Image (cartoon, coloured by chain):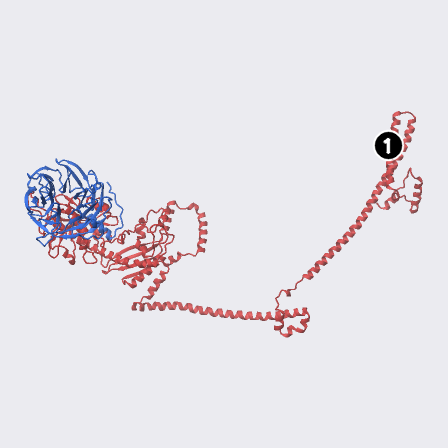
Chain colours: A red, B blue
Amino acid sequence: MSSESSKKRKPKVIRSDGAPAEGKRNRSDTEQEGKYYSEEAEVDLRDPGRDYELYKYTCQELQRLMAEIQDLKSRGGKDVAIEIEERRIQSCVHFMTLKKLNRLAHIRLKKGRDQTHEAKQKVDAYHLQLQNLLYEVMHLQKEITKCLEFKSKHEEIDLVSLEEFYKEAPPDISKAEVTMGDPHQQTLARLDWELEQRKRLAEKYRECLSNKEKILKEIEVKKEYLSSLQPRLNSIMQASLPVQEYLFMPFDQAHKQYETARHLPPPLYVLFVQATAYGQACDKTLSVAIEGSVDEAKALFKPPEDSQDDESDSDAEEEQTTRRRPTLGVQLDDKRKEMLKRHPLSVMLDLKCKDDSVLHLTFYYLMNLNIMTVKAKVTTAMELITPISAGDLLSPDSVLSCLYPGDHGKKTPNPANQYQFDKVGILTLSDYVLELGHPYLWVQKLGGLHFPKEQPQQTVIADHSLSASHMETTMKLLKTRVQSRLALHKQFASLEHGIVPVTSDCQYLFPAKVVSRLVKWVTVAHEDYMELHFTKDIVDAGLAGDTNLYYMALIERGTAKLQAAVVLNPGYSSIPPVFQLCLNWKGEKTNSNDDNIRAMEGEVNVCYKELCGPWPSHQLLTNQLQRLCVLLDVYLETESHDDSVEGPKEFPQEKMCLRLFRGPSRMKPFKYNHPQGFFSHR
Amino acid sequence: MERAVPLAVPLGQTEVFQALQRLHMTIFSQSVSPCGKFLAAGNNYGQIAIFSLSSALSSEAKEETHDGPVYSMVSTDRHLLSAGDGEVKAWLWAEMLKKGCKELWRRQPPYRTSLEVPEINALLLVPKENSLILAGGDCQLHTMDLETGTFTRVLRGHTDYIHCLALRERSPEVLSGGEDGAVRLWDLRTAKEVQTIEVYKHEECSRPHNGRWIGCLATDSDWMVCGGGPALTLWHLRSSTPTTIFPIRAPQKHVTFYQDLILSAGQGRCVNQWQLSGELKAQVPGSSPGLLSLSLNQQPAAPECKVLTAAGNSCRVDVFTNLGYRAFSLSF
């Protein structure tokens, strides 16, 4: 509160017990200032402590007076009113004092506040000033640091070192005398030099670029020239083909073959190489060719990254088409087809035999099973009329069966395949053998694949040495097989007509006159052979497997009928055919009840080596049949005459025999001696 | 009924040939070693196999001994004598088990014809004289002295080849049966034919549809049993009359007396045991479809190996430890 307001206040009556004189004095003092009563000035003069005492005293007085009034009021009386009045006045005075004190207190308070406020304002002002200054200081400091930190771009350039600079720069730039002393000038000079150098280098760069462009253009031109050369060379090679053929040097053809051979899978490649080598070295009649589509073979080998992408794509596709998934059976079929997939390329071998018949062998490779199979076909120079019984001889299914003993080609030779088959539900490979070809063991060996008997191996590598060691034997066996089959073919045609074709160089084995005739020659099924009552011994000895071919021959003379059941092993003629006989004449005689029938069987089965004839022994079967006719003749003619039965002997003895019976088992003379022409015993 | 099919073994040329040989093998003769522990068997390929009866394994040794079939064998106390195509050879039993055993000696009786070498069908030891009697294809009986090896006598009389011989100890006489249907008795001291029995002429036993040949003979001093084409008959020798005819249709190839039985074998699987009265006591089947020889191991040195062995139209020798059944078979 300013002193102006205090001046406007009306003067007030002061009643103070303490010092009325002072009051007057105060008035007079204040009159000097003006005619204003300033209680504020009074405040300064009074002592707050004393005021406080005064207050306390006044309060006490008031209390006392109130108490006395109380008493008086309670006493009652006339005087009381005056006393009460007196006391009331006193109390009023006290109240006035209190009011004054209150006012003083307020004023003191107000003063105090004003003072505080003023001081505060001053402090605030100083504070502001301080802040401003501090701020400016900070700002200036920042600026200073900025300036100090300033890096000129020129410092980022790697300038050449000082020595170099002085060495290389021309003197008008380096200005050594100036720059040595003055670092600023030095730097400027160096920058100048840098700029100059850069300009020069930029020039050079542009020149080089243009050079490069030129050279690139030249390269293009030359490339075009070369690429135009290739078709010309090709046309030259084409043109030279007739010349090659004329000179019998089919390089081109061989070259093409080698090209395709590069795409063959390893076992087929081994086979191809070995067969070509063998053909060139030993056997000119062997020709090797590669068939199949090279593009498909190339397509089999996709790069791995692509295949990964393909997998993820196909997964996505599969998710989309889950509803359309095919049935389990179709899936299994697909899996089976996948497992039995063949490599698109195959190797074809043509073996030419002396009589111009050709054996065509096509070798396939089953990729997932890692085995090779072969399909065979025999073509002859002339059209063959197939006799009924010879149906199976040259059939592609069985012509190569058991080339080596026991190699029937119905089971897969790779033991690991069994586990693969179990996964897709294939029982055996024999169901698929007709379309896939036969997986013979010798085929695997020719392809260099060697499968150990017991444990399946992870990978079987195609081995050249294995193939080479087997090539010659196998080729020879194949040729003998074809030739013996063809010979049999011809012989069967004749046998079916009842003629036993004996060649002139085998005539010496038999007497001039043979009366018994071959009447019938038919094929017999394996099961039927097993059911015959007189073949039990052969079956028990394990000689009648299902890879053999079975025939029945019927030889007759007069009332005697001799049935011969023949087992033809695929390995004919190194393995002889086996005969079992049953004679129907005066009862049924077989090897179990007649020793002589047993001896006859022994003559053809055991002593077959004499009947082989000149090598290759294709005449074995026909000679055996002819011998059977001779034996029947001897048997019938040497049968001792039964005196009790009337009538002449049915078969008069025409053969010359020294003795009719010999030995404890009373054998007939079945051995024919040439050239004397008589029969004797072994 | 389904036949059990044996597993097909991969057969090369040699296996097939061997199998065929075995199928067509006939074992003609057997003989037991003096120690009683070994059995020798001879077959139609000229091989002799020695089987050890005590261990009963497959043959210990197999020799290619003869060029032709080995029709008969006998054992002396140290030697094995085998005969077949015209020759008789001797082997030491002690050497026989070793490989590559060579024959001790070989002898050929003097034959008349040279066109064909006649076989020797029967060998007979005469221990009293220490000689060997051979008979066979040339219709004669030859006697050979075992010490010197010379052929002492020739007994002629048969008109067709001789099948079998038997020794009548007491006299001593030799009986021989042949293809001509007669059983002839020869006295060894006088070298003459004493008696002839023409079996086929007797109606009770003759069987013309089988022929007249006598295949087997056995004698027990007064009695003789013979068979072959005619029926198996028991004869009383002195009176030359057939006393019992054994009712078996198949021609018998070997007959022998054993204790109080007569054992016979022939065409047909079985070894037949007959009582002297003509009753069939037992028929024990063997494994061969026809039997040609029986051998009884009665050597006193090895009583534990007392067996009957039978062999014939197969490659197996059946061993009967007890006459009632076939114990096992030895394989050639």
User: Seen in the image, is A452 located left or right of residue A587?
Assistant: right
Report whether residue B95 is seen.
Answer: yes
Nearer to us in this view, B149 or A347: B149
Nearer to us in this view, B2 or A14: B2
The residue under label 1 is A63
Q: Position of residue A552 (x, y in %)?
A: 19, 48
- The chain to which mark 1 is attached is A
Residue A161: quarter of image: bottom right
Q: Position of residue B269 (x, y in %)?
A: 18, 41
Query: Mark 1: which amino acid?
Result: Gln
User: Seen in the image, is A33 located left or right of residue A520?
Assistant: right
The residue lying at 21 percent from left, 58 percent from top is A616
Q: Position of residue A232 (x, y in %)?
A: 38, 69
* Above or below A139: residue A431: above
- Crowd class of label 1 (few under 14; some 14 to 19; many from 20; radius 10 Å): few
The residue lying at 82 percent from left, 47 percent from top is A115
Total number of numbered discs in the rendering: 1
Residue B244: quarter of image: top left
Nearer to us in this view, A647 or A536: A536
Element on which disc 1 rests: helix
* Above or below A442: residue B167: above
Report whether residue A497 is seen.
Answer: no
Q: Position of residue B235 (x, y in %)?
A: 9, 39
Give the quarter of the figure containing the N terminus of chain B: top left
